[in-house]
């Protein structure tokens, strides 16, 4: 629900996704933005910047061009507005995880570790780690991932261990 509201879910969409009536959904959205006014400010500023520049960008400056952001067709324009909100968040997350992956790979190689980075799933990394390297890899990931790029807010990470992927869910 949180992501839905931030990414422009209407009262109708919230009604369909929950057990709320249309009126309750409308009140929920209004109260959400009343409680978190900076979120509303960010959303409006991001859309306005996209309208003015024709693009949005990630924390590392990668641009997502939005040629339909000023469309006269409301549905086309609103789709571009949703992309304008989504792209900096999702794209910045991708920037951060990729830099973390490069830094982790370099350090694992420098230390001549047998551990292997197997898979990236959104903002998660999956490793295969020999028993004797578990503590070193935990320290390495804890040290490197939160420092991939400097942000004004701390990056929190969680480490899960298991003998197979199912044990880590």
Image (cartoon, helix red, strand yellow):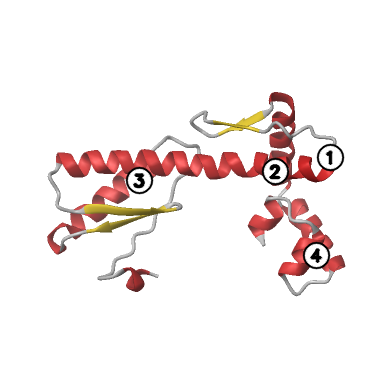
Residue occupying image coordinates x 77% and y 42%: 76
Dot 4 falls on a residue whose secondary structure is helix
Could you tell me if the residues under marks 3 and 2 are in contact, i.e. CB atoms within 8 Å?
A: no
In this view, 146 is above or below 1: above
Dot 2 corresponds to which residue?
38
**In this rendering, the label closer to the viewer, 3 or 2:** 3
Front one among 89 and 74: 74
Dot 3 falls on a residue whose secondary structure is helix
Dot 4 corresponds to which residue?
25
Mark 4 to mark 1 CA distance (whole Å): 26 Å
Dot 2 falls on a residue whose secondary structure is helix
Residue occupying image coordinates x 71% and y 68%: 17
Mark 1 to mark 3 CA distance (whole Å): 42 Å
Mark 4 to mark 3 CA distance (whole Å): 38 Å
* Mark 3 or mark 2: whose residue is earlier in sequence: 2
Dot 1 falls on a residue whose secondary structure is loop
**In this rendering, the label closer to the viewer, 1 or 2:** 1
Dot 3 corresponds to which residue?
145
In this view, 102 is above or below 169: above
Dot 1 corresponds to which residue?
73
């Amino acid at each position: 629900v949180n992501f839905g509201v931030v990414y422009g879910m209407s009262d109708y969409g919230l009604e369909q996704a929950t057990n709320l009536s249309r009126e309750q959904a409308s009140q929920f959205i209004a109260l959400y933005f009343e409680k978190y006014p900076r979120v509303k400010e960010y959303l409006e500023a991001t859309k306005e910047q996209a309208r003015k520049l024709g693009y949005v960008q990630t924390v590392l400056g990668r641009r997502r061009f939005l040629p339909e952001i000023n469309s006269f067709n409301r549905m086309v324009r609103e789709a571009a507005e949703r992309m304008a909100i989504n792209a900096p968040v999702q794209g910045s997350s991708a920037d951060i995880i990729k830099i973390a992956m490069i830094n982790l790979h370099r350090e694992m190689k420098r230390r001549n570790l047998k551990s292997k980075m197997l898979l990236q799933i959104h903002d998660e990394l999956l490793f295969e780690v020999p028993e004797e390297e578990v503590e070193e890899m935990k320290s390495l990931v804890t040290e490197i991932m939160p420092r991939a790029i400097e942000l004004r807010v701390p990056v929190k990470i969680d480490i899960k261990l298991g003998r197979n992927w199912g044990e880590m869910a």
